[in-house]
Image (cartoon, rainbow, N blue to C red):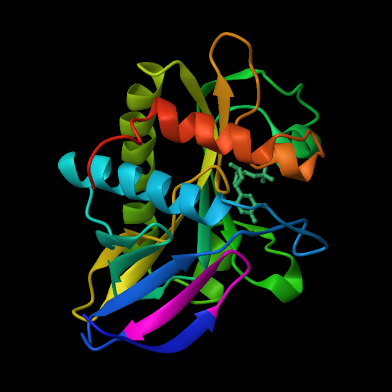
Amino acid sequence: MEILGLLYEGKAKKIYSTDQEEQLLVEYKDDATAFNGEKRDVISGKGELNNRISGIFFRLLTENGVENHYLKEISPTKQLVKKVEIVPIEVVIRNIVAGSLAKRLGLAEGTILPQPVVEFYYKNDQLGDPLINSSHIAVLQLATKEQVQKMKAISLKVNEIITAFLRERKIILVDFKLEFGITGDGQLILADEISPDTCRFWDEETYEKLDKDRFRRDLGNVEEAYRKILNRIGGEENV
Ligand code: TMP
């Protein structure tokens, strides 16, 4: 596999084309941003940690029958993925109240939800990724009704798989964000990344935050927290 040009540079990743038409290379960067890019920093080692962590979660999902874009790890910060057209919707699943849900509904952070909450956000930096519902998705033609149903069903399945996996490792999956893409042959599959940048992870015993909230809220030890996640989910395995 040969790396060709840079196709796209996002806030936390770079995407390169390869000599394989249907495959892209994702490079995880050390850059961190929050609040739609207003807060910025470089967290040394983050790219490598997120590449490894995301790879572990995608392989777990593949083993459990959830189709996704991940193909293989190429280097400490790079992974090969299937080429997809990203659907401009972020699906957020919440098990425990935190972040924007606490603000929006006036609920205390840490409140256990009686059932998972499913939310959709419009992936649009200019608008600051607003919360949207299925009618908005329909009028904006972001996805079909069937695709929305499928994204919701897959996201809830991902929640069950990762929640159970992390529970055995004494980590609580508080909430997370997923993105989906359409393959060349029109299939909707899970894409993007699953890492402490895109999930909230709390230590089961101490409730210590082991995710990007450490950066968002200036709690310090960001890299150490991400490393704890990698170590607990088995980062020493051969990849
Ligand atoms: P929120 O509480 O800020 O809405 O975040 C919900 C979840 O989504 C949390 O696990 C972090 C993740 N997330 C992203 O991955 N990207 C984003 O841009 C935002 C705002 C949240």
- Which residue is situated farthest in the top direction here? 205
Image height check: is 187 above or below 1? Answer: above
User: For the point 30% across and 32% down, which residue is it?
Assistant: 161
Q: Residue 211: x and y, percent? A: 61, 37
Residue 36 occupies quadrant: bottom right
Q: Is residue 10 magenta?
A: yes
Classified by dominant secondary structure, the portion drawn in magenta counts as: strand
Given residues 93 and 47, the one toward you in this image is: 47
In the drawing, does residue 75 fall left or right of residue 226?
Answer: left
Residue at horizontal 58 percent and vertical 24 percent from the top: 202
Dividing the picture into quadrants, the one containing residue 73 is bottom left
Q: Position of residue 88 (x, y in %)?
A: 51, 70
Question: With respect to residue 94, does 134 lie above or below?
Answer: below
Instruction: Please report the bounds of the magenta region as a residue range.
Output: 9-17
Is residue 93 shown to the viewer in this render? Answer: no
Is residue 55 one of those drawn in magenta?
A: no
For the point 49% across and 46% down, the residue is 195
Q: Is residue 91 visible?
A: yes
In-front residue for pair 33/132: 33
Q: Quadrant of the N terminus?
A: bottom left
- 25 to the left or right of 62: right
Whether 140 is drawn above or below 220: the answer is below
Q: Quadrant of residue 101?
A: top right
